Amino acid sequence: MTKRGQKFVKVLFASMLLTLTVALGGCSGDKAAGDSTQIADTSAASSSEANTAANAETNASSEETGGASETEAGDSHITIGIPQDLDSLVPSLSQGAGTQEILYNIYEGLYKPDSEGNLVPAVASDYTMSEDGLVYTFTLRDGVQFHNGNPVTVADVKYSIETCAGLNGGEPVISAFSNIESVETPDDSTIVITLEKSSSSFMAILATVEAAIVPADVADLQTNPVGTGPYKFVSRSLQENVVLERFDEYWGEKAHIKDITLKVLADSDSIVMNLQGGAVDLVARVSTAQAAELGDEFEVLEGTMNLVQAMYLNNAVEPFDNEKVRQALCYAVNKQEILDFVSEGKGTPVGSSMFPAFGKYYIEELNDLYTTDIEKAKELLADAGYPDGFSFTMKVPSNYQQHVDTAQVVAEQLKQIGVTANIELIEWETWLSDVYQGRDFEATLVGVDASTLTAGAMLSRFRSDVHNNFVNFSNEEYDAAYADALAAEAVMDDDKATEAYKKCETILAETAANVYIQDMCELVAVRKGYTGYTFYPLYIQDFSKLEIQ
Amino acid sequence: MKLKFHHPDLSACRSGRMGVSMKKKKHSPNFILGLGITGVMLLLILIGFIHTPYDITKMDSTAKLAAPSPAHLMGCDNFGRDIFSRVLKGMGNTFVIATATVAIGTVSGVIIGAFTGYFGGWLDEVLMRVNDVVFAFPSILLALVFVSIFGTGKYNVIAALGIAFIPSFARIVRGEFIKYREMDYVKSARLAGVPELRIIFVHILPNTMPVLISSVMIGFNNAVLAEAGMSYLGIGVQPPNASLGSMLSESQTYLFSAPWYAVFPGLMIILMVLGLSLLADQGRKV
């Protein structure tokens, strides 16, 4: 009997162990952090990206064991959790929004965005533009140093811009820079960039981190990243961490915290554990549920992600090629209910491909274009020839928990009009290749962000002939309105351009190009004692403003 | 040594029926416990197929993460969906996938193992080397590769795990056949001119049953865990449908605020596996 008892215990133990193995094994799985960003621009440098802010802090509390920091600012340290490893350390080759938001701290362009969304001088000290908008003349700031101690020269600037524009051979790395005709350096503090066509968005694109100024004489930035930003690169352990150190010769306001460790938390489920255990001090973009699990030791800051979360529909496949069907879906989806279920009501409903941070381009009224009306949705479906509804597959990237959650609520809401949405979870890489590049999908639920605060960053992708129009939206009126906007920009008529962009936006909403949902709320978990986290209207994490109290 | 088993129908081995036939021989407490647990699990699965207290995708914003109560026996998840209903359906999904997986693995494994073990020769060499190659990969990894090529979803997971399970069955059956093919009764049968196929399936196969039944049950357990693991990774049963693994995965974030969300699906996995393990343990002793 005792033998049997032992056996029983053994079997029980073994079963539990097996279960545990599965559970733990799963932990290393593939959920990426909290939510967030989505299409960083994969191929089109000019297209998308969004915002979010960065925040920071440092921890002064002495009881902290993990990434503890000393109170003296000189030796201060913070560990920040990031959802994925950096895809490149070379700014012009970086793709993911999650990579670029980090590189923002290491590299700078001639200009850079500040926390208000304005462009402020960085490596350049100012610029003038010719009246026809074709010639930009920049003055190099005095005394800017690279992290390797060399001063920044106009030759470095010329090299950097020409590389991005493809003038040194090869394809333009930034597609909008193919518009650059020449880069000249008449003296050792002046850079003259000449465009083929004027463009009001040129400065905004010049200020993205992809167009950063890098040294002409450093052969391999991938292994030896050298920039001019407030933090310099120290070391990197693939899929594990990136270590940064304050650059004391920085030309501007120096960073407060000396050492930063960026820890890769590829598993969103481990975020809470890492924060509570003291392994990381700050994670941007935690979910409301995760935020609720954190105790008093943390402060949760609230901002917006600056992206448009929507059920993007492939406008070229049945039944989504029918405008009435798309409108019916819009009427059936209740945005407020989604917010209530997924994020405790936090977030801003949007009605088109534009979010509030865009200011003058954003049309708030479009949010109410489709107030939930099940009867009307059914009528529209019947009109369109689907009185009994239909079923379709919605592909959702599995590493973004908020999108997966939202997709489930949407699927449930669509049941009311007899439409069945089958959710298919796919890997982020698969999403990029199949959905975004291959356009092989019926519907997908993601967020689309913007790389600059120019309206084109959100709207250019819906022109019928562009390579990143992954929803296959095709509308002549839209193309015409967008062309108007570009024409107005070329002659620097901002009012007219804004009006044309707004028209584009309205067309997207009225033809229900996609089922627009919200600009998601961003929650930043910060250990108490660290302050200074700053939200940006773009997808940027600014570590230099972090402080230890 | 010559045992007569009249249960070539392997599916019966998982249910209580096998227990009934064995009961006459032995009543060990472990066996009875295993039988009890498995019986209750099967009953729950059956109930889940017929009826669940709530629609498993019905969301209720007033019951988000509600604690267990008479209305919701196991509480509610983050969408206010009834966890008890989802556990019932989830067990059904897990059970169907595990059963189908083991069925594929067993049938193919028995055929491959029987022929290679009985005939030997080059066929044995080739098939067993292929077997070794498949066997060299952990089954989850193999299934992951399969799913990444053919896509996610229930049926792909069944196919993927089924294929991954073939080698272990083939190997066990082959070992048994190698042992039996030189036995006197097989030699006699061969001399008497009994057709080879008849020798394989009628004379030898029944004798491998004790081993086979244990491995089927252990295999079933592994399949339950593998399915849970795959759904946990988000590549098995797709939301909003439920499986025990996907529920475990979804519940992690709420581990401290709503522990019942993780505990019940986890408990069900443990019980399913424990019940079968106890039965398999008994089967091995027969």
Image: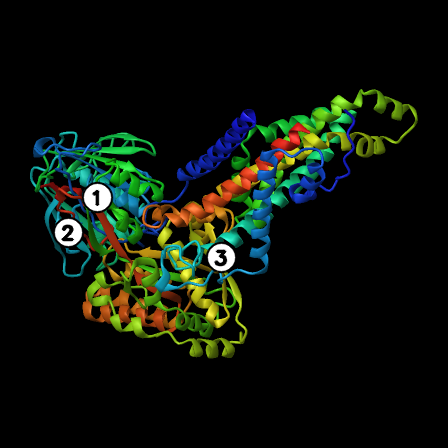
Image quarter hosting the C terminus of chain B:
top right
Q: Amino acid at mark 3?
A: Ser
Chain bearing tag 1 is A
Q: Position of residue A106 (x, y in %)?
A: 20, 39
Q: Which residue is mark 2?
A: A114
Q: Residue at x 48, y 31 (%)?
A: A13
Q: Residue at x 48, y 62 (%)?
A: B54
Q: Amino acid at mark 2?
A: Asp
Q: Amino acid at mark 1?
A: Tyr
- Quick one: label 2, few (<14), some, or many (20+) residues within 10 Å? some
Q: Are marks 2 and 3 on the same chain?
A: no
Secondary structure type for disc 1: loop
Label 1 to label 2, Cα distance in Å?
11 Å
- Left/right of residue A36 with respect to residue A245 in the rendered view: right
Q: Which residue is mark 3?
A: B85
Label 3 to label 1, Cα distance in Å?
48 Å
The quadrant in which residue A25 appears is top left
Q: Are marks 3 and 1 on the same chain?
A: no
In the image, residue A539 sits, relative to residue B102, either above or below, namely below
Q: Position of residue A310 (x, y in %)?
A: 37, 61
Q: Which of the two labelled residues, at mark 1 and mark 2, occupies the earlier sequence position?
A: 1
Q: Position of residue B137 (x, y in %)?
A: 55, 30
Residue projecting furthest to the front: A1
Q: Nearest to the eye among marks 2 and 3: give it.
A: 3
Secondary structure type for disc 3: helix
Secondary structure type for disc 2: loop
The quadrant in which residue A151 appears is top left
In the image, residue A22 sits, relative to residue A42, either above or below, namely above
The quadrant in which residue A255 appears is top left
